[in-house]
């Protein structure tokens, strides 16, 4: 984009030509199955992530290899057995200077060549151990985007005395936002929001049974919270929670 704008300023290309080049360069088409938005990070501050579910292994490999020319690549919701089946096809990227890291619990594959600027701090709290996979998805997304993450797991309302020292530590470390991940009755975000003066993001998980099955009880409880200052994302959406937290942090830095 910088090169195109420089040519425009120098009079080497017309405004119409620059517009046409920018429009054609911001979408990368891969055969008949993918159109990659290569300029999303310039518009929104966060690059397009590759959502693995619903894609064939060959399609994921082709997308990762094609996107490697554009910078860092993140593949989400990639189960361990699927990573094992494509790993051998990505090993050559290490010879090209990329770091290829798979985070099993978060189900995220990260292919990185460029380091990112450190931008802020995020706290992540889970109610139970079963909520950790969703929290780990959020943690990896945040860390790979330049955030320092302080996390405390299994400090839910069933043993509320476990919570307070961890919230205090996060406030002392001056985190910018706290993600609170909880299933079952989903009460923990309301508790945390009543203790802090920074944004809280409620992340309901699908952990639960009976009336709590599927995460809808947790979602509804968070949406109905009487504590102000809570934003709520979709069920099991650790990725979206992290991106929202990053948006908060970046808006404070601008």
Image: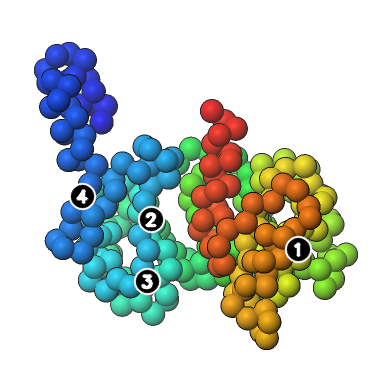
Q: Is residue 86 above or below residue 8?
A: below
Q: From mark 4 to mark 1, how far is it between C-alphas?
A: 42 Å
Q: Earlier in the sequence, mark 4 or mark 1?
A: 4
Q: Are marks 1 and 2 in contact (CB under 8 Å)?
A: no
Secondary structure beneath label 2: loop
Residue indicated by mark 1: 188
Q: From mark 1 to mark 2, how far is it between C-alphas?
A: 29 Å
Left/right placement of residue 84 relative to residue 28 reads right
Q: Are marks 2 and 3 in contact (CB under 8 Å)?
A: no
Residue shown at 26% from the left, 52% from the top: 36
Residue shown at 17% from the left, 27% from the top: 18
Q: Is residue 173 visible?
A: no
Percent across and percent down for residue 230 are 69, 51
The quarter of the rendered structure image containing the N terminus is top left
Residue shown at 58% from the left, 47% from the top: 245
Residue found farthest to the top: 10
Q: Nearer the viewer, residue 44 or 47?
A: 44
Residue indicated by mark 3: 53
Q: Quadrant of residue 173?
A: top right
Left/right placement of residue 127 relative to residue 254 reads right
Residue indicated by mark 2: 49
Mark number displayed over residue 28: 4
Left/right placement of residue 65 relative to residue 242 reads left
Q: Are marks 3 and 1 in contact (CB under 8 Å)?
A: no
């Amino acid at each position: 984009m910088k090169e195109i704008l420089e040519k425009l300023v120098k009079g080497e290309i017309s405004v119409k030509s620059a517009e046409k080049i920018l429009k054609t360069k911001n979408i990368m088409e891969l055969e008949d199955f993918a159109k990659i938005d290569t300029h999303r990070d310039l518009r929104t501050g966060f690059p397009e992530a590759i959502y693995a579910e619903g894609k064939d292994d060959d399609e994921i490999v082709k997308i990762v290899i094609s996107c490697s020319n554009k910078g860092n690549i993140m593949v989400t919701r990639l189960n361990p057995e699927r990573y094992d089946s494509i790993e051998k096809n990505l090993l050559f990227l290490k010879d090209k200077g990329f770091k290829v890291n798979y985070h099993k619990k978060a189900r995220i594959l990260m292919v990185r060549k460029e380091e990112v600027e450190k931008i802020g701090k995020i706290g992540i709290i889970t109610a139970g151990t079963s909520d950790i996979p969703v929290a780990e998805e959020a943690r990896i997304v945040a860390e790979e985007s330049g955030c320092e993450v302080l996390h405390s797991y299994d400090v839910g309302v069933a043993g509320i005395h476990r919570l307070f020292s961890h919230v205090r530590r996060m406030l002392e470390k001056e985190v910018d936002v706290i993600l609170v991940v909880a299933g079952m009755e989903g009460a923990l975000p309301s508790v945390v929001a009543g203790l802090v003066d920074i944004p809280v993001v409620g992340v309901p998980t699908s952990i639960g049974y009976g009336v709590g099955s599927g995460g809808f009880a947790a979602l509804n409880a968070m949406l109905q919270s009487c504590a102000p200052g809570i934003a709520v994302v979709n069920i099991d959406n650790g990725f979206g929670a992290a991106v929202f937290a990053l948006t908060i942090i970046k808006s404070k830095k601008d």
